[in-house]
Image: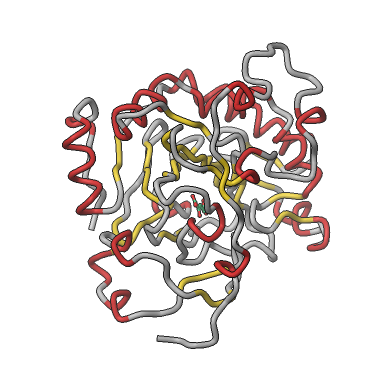
Amino acid sequence: MLFTDSTPILDDGDALRERAATDGYLFFRGLLPAEAILPVRADLLNVVRQHGWLTDEATGTLDVAALAAVPESRMRTDIGVSAAAYDAVQKLESVHALPHHPRLLALYNTLFADEVLVHARHIIRMISPHPAVFPTPPHQDFPLIQGTQNTWTCWFPIGDCPRSMGSLKVLRGSHKLGYLPLKPAKGAGAIAVQTCPWEENEDDWIEGDFALGDVLTFPAFTVHKALPSQFADRIRLSFDVRYQPLSEPVEEKSLLPHCGLTWEQVYETWHTDDLKYYWRKLPLIYSGWNPKLLQPERRIC
Ligand SMILES: O=C(O)CCC(=O)C(=O)O
């Protein structure tokens, strides 16, 4: 089944909450303007080019042999490129500005009917055909992020991303299941929810061809996974970023960079100060971290 476009109810908080309570996701066609995304795409591909992997910018085609020569130990297999390339991406000011786009802030402000906290930890996937990189397995974000259960993931591609390029799909209604036991898995996060009877109904998996600007968002218990890419030589660029009501607890790792760098290192070449440490000015409530939530259970249902 295909995503329902919620653009017609974008400004109606009650309608958004009602639909999200039923489906466990919201999808918006063209929410982000091309002029907000294209400069970020250029910045990301510039990093890929500097590492010698890009052969065609328009399509995001890679020199597969050059990328495959990067040893697995130097890869960020959850991201799709080397750790060094990902550090360079995390230093980009444009990457940290995009999640604060007014259209995203307005969406979550309407959805939460509350002030919005943008998590500072943005994940920039650059899913590539490197042999150690696998499609993201079916999982819930809550064990990985914790804090309030009312944290929403926002997934959007940085360029067109049809299903054939490995876009994200969600299991409709799975947010109602609460926390699901885990098993180890290949792919981003390295965990998957255990196979359960609800997975047998393929019709409950909702998917779609994303065009530049389309946005998918879902709460912390919604099961989601990536489709396998049909392209042997293309990079899939996407953001997954997170938003929550400001008045609810946040786990402190959500405010750290998604790489080994410090914020001071991330900020080294920025031209503006507005977004530096923006969360320190906010009245945050912190929650603890429960490592047990990430421990795979042996029982398979
Ligand atoms: O983009 C992907 O492949 C994974 C994204 C994801 O798991 C998420 O948005 O939480």
**On screen, residue 219 above or below 59:** below
Say left or right for 53 vs 42: right
Looking at the picture, how far across and down is residue 233, in whole percent? Answer: 61, 53
Q: Which residue is drawn at 73% across and 42% down?
A: 86
**On screen, residue 19 above or below 196:** above
The quarter of the picture where the C terminus appears is bottom left
**On screen, residue 87 above or below 301:** above
Q: Nearer the viewer, residue 159 or 120?
A: 120
The quarter of the picture where the N terminus appears is bottom left
Say left or right for 89 vs 40: right
Q: Which residue is drawn at 50% across and 43% down?
A: 249
Q: Which of 47 and 56 is in front in this view?
A: 47
Looking at the picture, how far across and down is residue 206, in whole percent? Answer: 29, 57
Say left or right for 244 vs 205: right
Looking at the picture, how far across and down is residue 210, in whole percent? Answer: 37, 42
Q: Which of 296 and 10 is in front in this view?
A: 296
Q: Quadrant of residue 77?
A: bottom right
Looking at the picture, how far across and down is residue 133, in whole percent? Answer: 64, 62
Q: Residue at x 38, y 37 (%)?
A: 215
Q: Residue at x 42, y 19 (%)?
A: 102
